Amino acid sequence: MKRIVLAAIGLLFLSLLGLGLAPSPIEPAEWDPPPPTPLEGPWARNERLKPVEWWAKQVVGPEAMFIDADGSVVTGLKDGRIVRLRPGVDEPTVLADTHGRPLAIARHPDGRIVICDAFRGLLALDAAGLLEVLASEHGGTPFRFTDDLDIARDGTVFFTDASARHSIDRFTMDLLEHQTTGRVLRWDPATRRTALVASGFSFANGIALAPDESFLVVAETGGYRLWRVWLTGARAGEREPFGDPLPGFPDNVRLSRSRGAFWVAIGSPRNAVVDALAHAPSLRSFIAKLPRWLQPAPARFAHVAAIGLDGRVLESLQYDAPDSYSPITSGLEHDGWLYLGSFAREGVARLKLEPQAGGR
């Protein structure tokens, strides 16, 4: 028995030595996490997302969506398909297959569907089912992780490239590394060219235009916060924090015009281990070499919040349970319902919202 124990200890020592000598897949940067935001006050714990209506569970990974003119949900799936779903109906109608990983999706003023495909870039799908690549690089740097988009009234497409270093299948490495290579870009339908709007984000994720299109709200997942990026006026090109730090990792952002707020999906709560390692890049470099099951993992916690146009928290909808519809990566309000998407969960969910004060 003693020999077995000694052999096991020796094997563990050799394994750790091998990991220590092996190259790391990341180059971690030091950073200063904002103070934790407790789940109290406007963030107080609740179970408002427990009674969601959940359908089409045979489809997986509807990261984001838009509601078409006929009330159907159009979304992209983990397997590359673009599908149309009808509330309460499980069978999808397939519109196309990007052969990549479609994430954000929206209807363009020209009638086409514009898609952020994590692997292929910014795409457009016409009524005949033909796909066109609108952009796949900018400034000589290929898009590694085309993530979210919003479209202005004149057809300009604003979108995020989450990381210049890691693709979607390595997004946890980007968060662990905390390099600030994420950027916001725009695609001009007149010139068919891209331009840089803002850069220097740790995992540039969700994006949404203000009602008057004077600014963008951008979710920096790695920094637990939202940013306001000004597009017009004397401060055009500048950015500033939009509200206080969030209690988790923000994902997609969607404007609700009727509510006068942005719905922000919070994919998972902050991880105390990740925060504790912010000033220990060498240790994070080692952790990145460990098997995935030994690395910090996100908790299953359904959470979406409404953030006002001034950055204040208006509502926080949650459900902390193993059977919750989570991680939530998008929340879209339409006709009194909040539609929820997830990059990993099966099916689409929605919740009937309570009437707003004043009948808005």
Image (cartoon, helix red, strand yellow):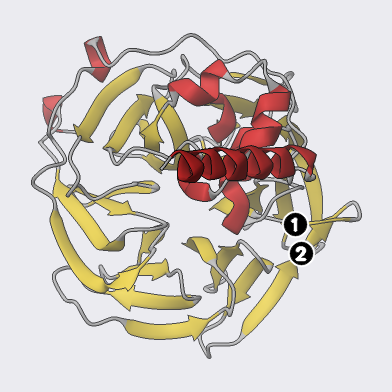
Q: Quadrant of residue 163?
A: top right
In the image, residue 180 above or below residue 290 = above
Q: Which residue is mark 2?
A: 136
Q: Which kind of residue does numbered mark 2 sit on?
A: Ser
Mark 1 and mark 2 in contact? Answer it, CB < 8 Å: yes
Q: Which residue is mark 1?
A: 143
Q: Residue at x 57, y 25 (%)?
A: 223
Measuring from the top left, give residue 291's x and y in whole percent: 55, 49
Q: Residue at x 19, y 47 (%)?
A: 324
107 lies left or right of 118: left
Instruction: Determine crowd level at label 1: few under 14, some 14-19, many 20+ residues with C-alpha closer than 10 A.
Output: many
Measuring from the top left, give residue 323's x and y in whole percent: 17, 49
What quarter of the picture does the N terminus occupy? top left
Residue 210 showing in the rendered view: yes
Q: Which kind of residue does numbered mark 1 sit on?
A: Phe
Measuring from the top left, give residue 298's x and y in whole percent: 40, 39
Between 9 and 230, which is closer to the camera in this rendering?
9
- Residue 276 bears which disc, if any? none
In the image, residue 158 above or below residue 72 = above
